[in-house]
């Protein structure tokens, strides 16, 4: 029996600002729903502060001079979600088969509360049953040892701390593979690939202090009000200084329009609010290459004209000559681009792009902030390269207030890549690992997320271990993946709450419950701290103090160590137990592996604001083959990777304001005015008329990938919305069934979740 929501769906425009009383009311709903104890309120006061714990929600940096309450609505929801007093116990599993639970919604599964015991799947009864940790680890070891290492994938989600991530990557390599797919593969991998090729580092070059030095911000495809709300404070202060914020987003996201600071009594009481964007351009999904090329075209042609008459140049020619490569090819491509093509592909008028270009040409220091709206396209890497092209034109990298600022997702997703969670050999200090641990690390490229999906479907992947996350729900092609999953020899999931991935068993299946980051983690030498890296490469210590949800939980480092001991031959140079007894020793090992980044790691662990790992591009040292920052002329104007056709739409799969990825906190997407349902199809009114559908009508979507496979999502409520023609919006992860595995970014393999070709079926 599927559980039902009590709320009746209600969809109507929301007039309020981001933040403000809406965020306070939302908290007043969430805290009682999670039935938290007063301890949770104490924990909230420790959130994102030195010696406190680092929020489990987004990766936005934590300032050294923190506010009294250094958390946002979403961060508080994440904390309450972990500290809930609700529990999912063996008694629960005795009452429900997995077949039955597969009819439950994502919300109902997680809302049932924290997992309390290690569990083994029993095929005879189709139920999970409690087991001992020893039994689980021994069985996992017995199942893994005989397998070809190449057929095993070690997935991880970006929340896992640096310590557990380092051990996990090392375990995989000692086992004999680099099959380390992670959530980053679905997220900012286009950044890691694009920025590395363009400026020699895989991460953004800016820090919080750059918000104080910029005079313009270009903002592409990131929904700050829902997904990184603490940044609203930085944007608000920038606006108060008169900084122009030029936004490109198909949707008018409320956080990008206006914000009332919930921490300012005056703003709260007077209804004061800050306008965030000074220009708002509703670019078509996949239209950013065209939009950025249009801006570049203006700036380059103004420069041509200025030089012709001896006026001061518009471009930074000294910077371009000294620091960049291939400018000419890019500039020629911009000059040659036709306005008709730019307007058609971006969905924006030339005059609108001219307005944006004027701001760019005038600004002395420009930040370019972006998120999934750029990375999750077939041309996602080119989107990122276009951001760099634009910045390079006026030397906007490597000086105060300027630079690319990708907004990372999970709280330690960037850090995982730093400490070896990667399928790519060139990102790993292979010689150092060999020297430290006396083994030959594999050099054959491992499987990323898309390749793991292919492998699960074609049967070449035989075992998947999941360190956090909800792999089966977050990936594309969810129907085929769910069908293939039971063919796995082994499925092991390490998690805090029950999710849909856990409802699909392999031949041998274990569900292992772990401590969350906010909980006290006591090992042999006493309470332990862990660490994470934020979006701006600052590394923070984090100490959990809350009482664990169950006495049977183990920490992630401990679980990894126990599996490692069962699958690897003894190695005197890696004493897993010794590491787990004192996480400071894991940090010493990380420092020994990456001495330049982690110098004095344990000593600097609780530096207010985190300690910075450094960034060569920020110093204008370009670690690229040419030794310079690379311009790249785009190969086309559209990022979608497919042609437009009659009746074919570009579907953007979106997050609501009431979810963290596949974790659904509730059914209230406040900023978009949707309450009580997630079965929404956002569509332009003119497209409704053209398709012959009416408001409130229930329709289906079918994928239109042209590969002959039927992929269908039923039951969507037609919802007229301010969205460019030809584009649709629906919520992730429910829409993932429509995404072909092969519809991914070239080079980075990020599933192209922001322009999925679909048709409406009535
Ligand atoms: N509360 C909360 N916080 C989160 C998350 C969460 O689910 N909930 N998830 C975390 C994670 S892992 C990540 S990666 C980040 C995700 O945070 P975001 O990067 O904000 O990702 P999305 O919510 O998918 O939204 C992308 C935005 O891009 C816009 N967009 C879509 N297509 C295009 C396009 O072609 N061009 C442009 N210019 N814009 C486009 C959409 O309208 C939307 O506003 O947030 C992190 N923080
Ligand atoms: N269509 C579409 N698909 C997408 C996206 C999109 O925009 N559109 N976004 C992509 C992106 S950016 C990302 S990052 C991925 C997200 O993919 P994942 O990172 O795999 O998914 P999450 O939903 O973040 O994982 C939630 C689960 O993590 C577990 N968990 C929570 N806290 C802990 C903990 O402390 N330890 C452990 N071990 N487990 C914990 C809980 O059991 C919870 O159910 O999805 C991607 N998929
Ligand atoms: Mo993400």
Image (cartoon, rainbow, N blue to C red):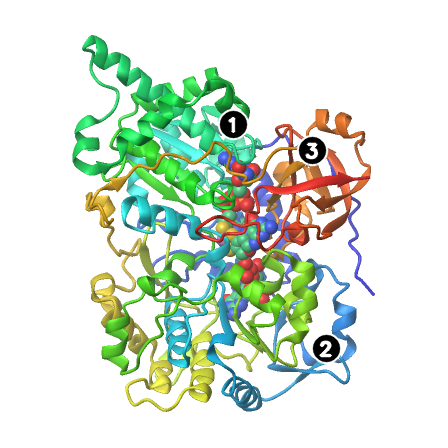
Crowding at label 1, few (<14), some or many (≥20) Cα neighbours within 10 Å? many
Report the disc number at residue 728: none
Q: Is residue 393 left or right of residue 754?
A: left
Q: Is residue 350 above or below residue 394?
A: above
Is the residue indicated by label 3 positioned so its CB lies within 8 Å of ligand 1?
Answer: no
Decide which of 203, 160 is in the foreground and name it: 203
Choose top left, top right, bottom left or bottom right for residue 478. bottom right
Q: Which residue was labeled with disc 3?
A: 683
Give the mark toward the camera: 1 or 3. 1
Decide which of 36, 751 is in the foreground and name it: 751
Q: Could you say where residue 610 lies in the image, as x and y percent from the top left?
A: 30, 56
Q: Quadrant of the C terminus?
A: top right
Query: Which residue lies at the image location 37% right of the left edge and 19% below the top edge?
Result: 298
Circle 1 — which element? helix
Q: Quadrant of the N terminus?
A: bottom right
Q: Earlier in the sequence, mark 2 or mark 1?
A: 2
Q: Which residue was labeled with disc 1?
A: 346
Query: Which residue lies at the image location 20% right of the left edge and 11% below the top edge?
Result: 311
Q: Could you say where residue 122 lies in the image, as x and y percent from the top left?
A: 71, 84
């Amino acid at each position: 029996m599927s559980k039902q929501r009590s709320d009746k769906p209600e969809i109507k425009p929301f007039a309020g600002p981001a933040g403000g009383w809406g965020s306070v009311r939302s908290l007043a709903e969430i805290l009682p729903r999670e039935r938290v104890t007063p301890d949770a309120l104490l924990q909230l006061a420790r959130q994102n502060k030195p010696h406190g714990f680092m929020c489990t929600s987004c990766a936005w940096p934590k300032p050294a001079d923190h506010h009294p309450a250094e958390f946002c609505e979403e961060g508080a929801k994440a904390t309450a979600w972990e500290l809930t007093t609700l529990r999912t116990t063996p008694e629960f599993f005795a009452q429900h088969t997995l077949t039955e639970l597969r009819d439950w919604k994502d919300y109902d599964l997680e809302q049932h509360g924290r997992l309390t015991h290690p569990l083994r799947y029993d095929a005879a009864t189709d139920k999970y049953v409690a087991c001992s940790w020893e039994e689980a680890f021994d069985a996992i070891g017995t199942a893994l040892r005989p397998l070809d290492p190449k057929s095993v994938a070690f997935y991880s989600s970006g929340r896992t701390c640096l310590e557990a991530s380092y051990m996990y990557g090392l375990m995989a390599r000692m086992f004999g593979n680099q099959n380390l797919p992670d959530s980053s593969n679905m997220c900012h991998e286009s950044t890691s690939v694009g920025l590395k090729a363009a400026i020699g580092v895989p991460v953004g070059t800016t820090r919080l202090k750059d918000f104080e030095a910029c005079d313009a911000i270009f903002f592409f495809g990131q929904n700050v009000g829902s997904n990184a709300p603490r940044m609203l404070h930085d944007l608000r202060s920038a606006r108060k200084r008169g900084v122009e914020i030029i936004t490109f987003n198909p949707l008018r996201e409320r956080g990008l329009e206006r914000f009332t600071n919930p921490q300012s009594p005056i703003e709260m009481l007077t209804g004061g609010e800050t306008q965030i964007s000074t220009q708002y351009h509703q670019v078509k999904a996949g239209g950013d290459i065209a939009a950025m090329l249009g801006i570049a075209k203006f700036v380059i042609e103004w420069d041509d004209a200025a030089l012709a008459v001896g006026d001061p140049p518009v471009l930074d020619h000294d910077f371009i000559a000294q620091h960049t490569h291939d400018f000419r090819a890019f500039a020629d491509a911009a000059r040659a681009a036709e306005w008709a093509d730019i307007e058609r592909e971006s969905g924006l008028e030339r005059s609108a792009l001219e307005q944006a270009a004027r701001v760019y040409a005038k600004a002395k220091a420009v930040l370019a902030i972006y998120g999934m709206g750029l990375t999750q396209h077939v041309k996602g890497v080119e989107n990122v390269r276009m951001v760099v092209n634009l910045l390079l034109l006026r030397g906007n990298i490597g000086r105060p207030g300027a630079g690319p600022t990708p907004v990372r997702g999970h709280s330690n997703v960037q850090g995982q890549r730093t400490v070896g969670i990667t399928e790519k050999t060139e990102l790993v200090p292979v010689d150092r690992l060999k020297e430290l641990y006396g083994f030959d690390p594999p050099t054959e490229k491992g499987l990323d997320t898309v390749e793991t999906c292919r492998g699960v479907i074609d049967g070449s992947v035989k075992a998947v271990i999941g360190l956090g996350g909800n792999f089966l729900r977050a990936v594309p092609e969810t129907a085929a993946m769910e069908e293939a999953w039971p063919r796995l020899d082994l499925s092991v999931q390490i998690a805090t709450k029950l999710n849909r991935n856990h409802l699909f068993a392999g031949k041998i299946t274990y569900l292992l419950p772990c401590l969350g980051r906010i909980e006290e983690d006591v090992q042999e030498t006493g309470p332990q701290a862990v660490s994470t890296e934020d979006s701006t490469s600052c590394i923070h210590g984090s100490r959990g103090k809350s009482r664990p949800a169950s006495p049977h939980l183990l920490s992630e480092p401990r679980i990894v160590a126990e599996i490692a001991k069962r699958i690897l031959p003894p190695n005197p140079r890696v004493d897993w137990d010794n590491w787990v007894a004192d996480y400071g020793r894991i940090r010493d090992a990380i420092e020994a592996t990456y001495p330049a980044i982690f110098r004095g790691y344990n000593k600097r662990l609780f530096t207010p604001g985190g300690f910075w790992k450094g960034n060569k591009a920020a110093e204008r040292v370009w670690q690229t083959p040419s030794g310079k920052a690379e311009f790249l002329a785009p190969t086309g104007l559209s990022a979608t990777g497919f042609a437009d056709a009659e009746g074919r739409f570009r579907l953007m799969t979106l997050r609501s304001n009431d979810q963290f990825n596949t974790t659904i906190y509730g059914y209230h997407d406040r900023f978009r005015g949707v309450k009580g349902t997630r079965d929404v199809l956002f569509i332009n009114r003119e497209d409704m008329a053209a398709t012959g559908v009416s408001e409130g009508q229930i329709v289906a979507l079918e994928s239109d990938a042209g590969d002959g496979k039927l992929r269908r999502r039923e039951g969507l409520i037609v919802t007229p919305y301010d969205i460019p023609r030809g584009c649709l919006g629906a919520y992730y992860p429910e829409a993932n069934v429509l995404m072909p595995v092969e519809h991914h970014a070239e080079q980075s393999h990020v599933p192209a979740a922001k322009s999925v070709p679909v048709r409406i079926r009535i």
